[in-house]
Image (cartoon, rainbow, N blue to C red):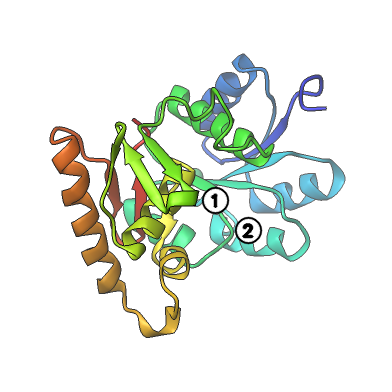
């Protein structure tokens, strides 16, 4: 279905110039876009028509994108992509588990935005991250049966926790995992652990990756939020 029907995307952004740029970039990529400038219009559009994704600016004139997100989530699981103007907002966007699927901070390039949106659709269309082609570029290979991860073809010597942590991050390079998601994935008793623990596991894991590839930072810190694996 996704082959023939263009994905339709609602853009909720009050700054016309930005909205037009986004619209143009999306249409160039074969998406169908519609622009509204207020939260009220957005809710009405979502009620009346079907969209595959909504891009929400956080600073809207009638209410914040976060409030709008809350209203949308009452009745819809539509994927949401946030535009944030300040990096502090990022914590709130995902840290509060607003149900954001991804975000980008302003200023951004239209090309980066469309690349992220295409990646988001690929994830949602259930492309198996282990599928050939999609993941063959990744330097990480998870060998579940041996509880082992190869990095640039070298088997890493990982603790069980590091294995779980890296396996999680490697699932979707570029995707930011919040501390609570990481905690849940790595620990047997999530309630026993502290955020600080994650930082130390990340530190040790980084050191092990650096041994194999000294010139590249593979684990990216998203301050106040969590970590992601570099996309290469
Ligand atoms: Ca705005």
Residue under the image location 36 percent in, 60 percent down: 225
Q: Which residue is mark 2?
A: 68
Residue under the image location 44 percent in, 44 percent down: 142
Is there any visible trace of residue 89 in the rendered image? no
Would you call the spot at circle 2 few (<14 residues within 10 Å), some (14-19), or many (20 or more)? Answer: many
**Quarter of the C terminus within the rendering:** top left
Residue under the image location 16 percent in, 42 percent down: 210
Q: Which residue is mark 1?
A: 60
**Vertical relation: 102 (above or below) 2:** below
Looking at the image, is mark 1 or mark 2 earlier in the sequence? 1
For the residues bearing labels 1 and 2, Cβ distance under 8 angstroms:
yes
Residue 224, percent across and down? 31, 62
Q: Nearer the viewer, residue 205 or 8?
A: 205
Q: Is mark 1 within 8 Å of ligand 1?
A: yes
C-alpha span from label 1 to label 2: 9 Å
Extreme bottom residue here?
Answer: 192
Q: Nearer the viewer, residue 146 or 71?
A: 146
Would you call the spot at circle 1 few (<14 residues within 10 Å), some (14-19), or many (20 or more)? Answer: some
Horizontal arrangement in the rendering, residue 49 relative to residue 63 (left or right): right
**Vertical relation: 140 (above or below) 94:** above
**Quarter of the N terminus within the rendering:** top right
Extreme top residue here?
Answer: 28
């Amino acid at each position: 279905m996704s082959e023939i029907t263009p994905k339709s995307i609602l853009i909720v952004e009050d700054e016309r110039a930005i909205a037009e740029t986004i619209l143009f970039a999306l249409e160039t990529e074969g998406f169908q876009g519609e622009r509204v400038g207020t939260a009220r219009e957005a809710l009405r559009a979502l009620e009346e028509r079907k969209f595959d994704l909504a891009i929400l600016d956080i600073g809207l004139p009638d209410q914040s994108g976060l409030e709008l997100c809350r209203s949308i989530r009452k009745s819809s699981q539509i994927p949401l992509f946030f535009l944030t103007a300040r990096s502090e907002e990022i914590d709130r966007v995902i840290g509060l588990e607003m149900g954001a699927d991804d975000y980008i901070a302003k200023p951004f390039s239209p090309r980066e935005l469309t690349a992220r949106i295409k990646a988001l659709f690929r994830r949602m269309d259930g492309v198996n991250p282990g599928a050939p082609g999609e993941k063959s570029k990744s330097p990480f290979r998870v060998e579940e049966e041996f509880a082992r991860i190869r990095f640039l073809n070298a088997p890493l010597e990982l603790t069980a926790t590091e294995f779980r942590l890296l396996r999680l991050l490697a699932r979707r390079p570029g995707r930011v995992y919040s501390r609570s998601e990481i905690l849940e994935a790595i620990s047997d008793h999530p309630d026993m652990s502290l955020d600080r623990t994650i930082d130390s596991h990340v530190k040790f894991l980084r050191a092990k990756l650096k041994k194999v590839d000294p010139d590249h930072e593979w684990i990216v810190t998203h301050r106040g939020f969590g970590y992601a694996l570099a996309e290469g």
